[in-house]
Amino acid sequence: MDQNHKPMIRNFEKITCNLTEEELQIAQSVMKGLKKFIGKPNAIAGSKMCSGFNNNTDHRMEGVKLRKIINHLRNQGEPICSSSKGYFYPANVQEIKDTCISIQQRVDSQIQVINQLSNHI
């Protein structure tokens, strides 16, 4: 599905709506800055990214907005990886594979929650 026409997530409409023009501009800055962090050992924490952004620009960045922007960039084809240490561009294919596994495990966990909640319907 085209990022510009993605559906909003129920009960989270405000934070899952399409990126605003301002957020699209911010996304370019995030991508440019993040490209300095290559490889898992060099990951940068989301909180550190937000602090740096807030201290060096006129825009306000919080974790929710950063995750929305990272999601947008990934959906646009940017191979942004993540770990418990933060975000980074991959130094090798294994780091991409590890990120894919991590994301799939989170999806699987959410499916288990859906199944359990559905038992109460």
Image (tube, grey):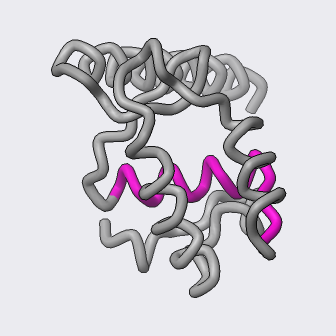
Residue positioned 25% across, 23% down in the render: 91
Q: Which of 1 and 74 is in front in this view?
A: 74
Res 22 quadrant in image: bottom right
Q: Please indicate whether residue 107 sits to the left or right of residue 13 in the image.
A: left
Res 58 quadrant in image: bottom right
Residue positioned 46% across, 69% down in the render: 6
Magenta span: chief secondary structure: helix
Residue at the limit of the structure toward the bottom, as seen here? 21
Residue 114 placement (x, y as % from top left): 62, 27
Q: Reply above or below: 39 against 49.
A: above
Residue at the limit of the structure toward the left, as seen here? 93
Residue 29 placement (x, y as % from top left): 52, 65
Residue 26 placement (x, y as % from top left): 58, 70
Residue 16 placement (x, y as % from top left): 64, 62
Please state the extent of the stretch shown in magenta in the rendering: 59-75
Residue positioned 77% across, 25% down in the render: 120
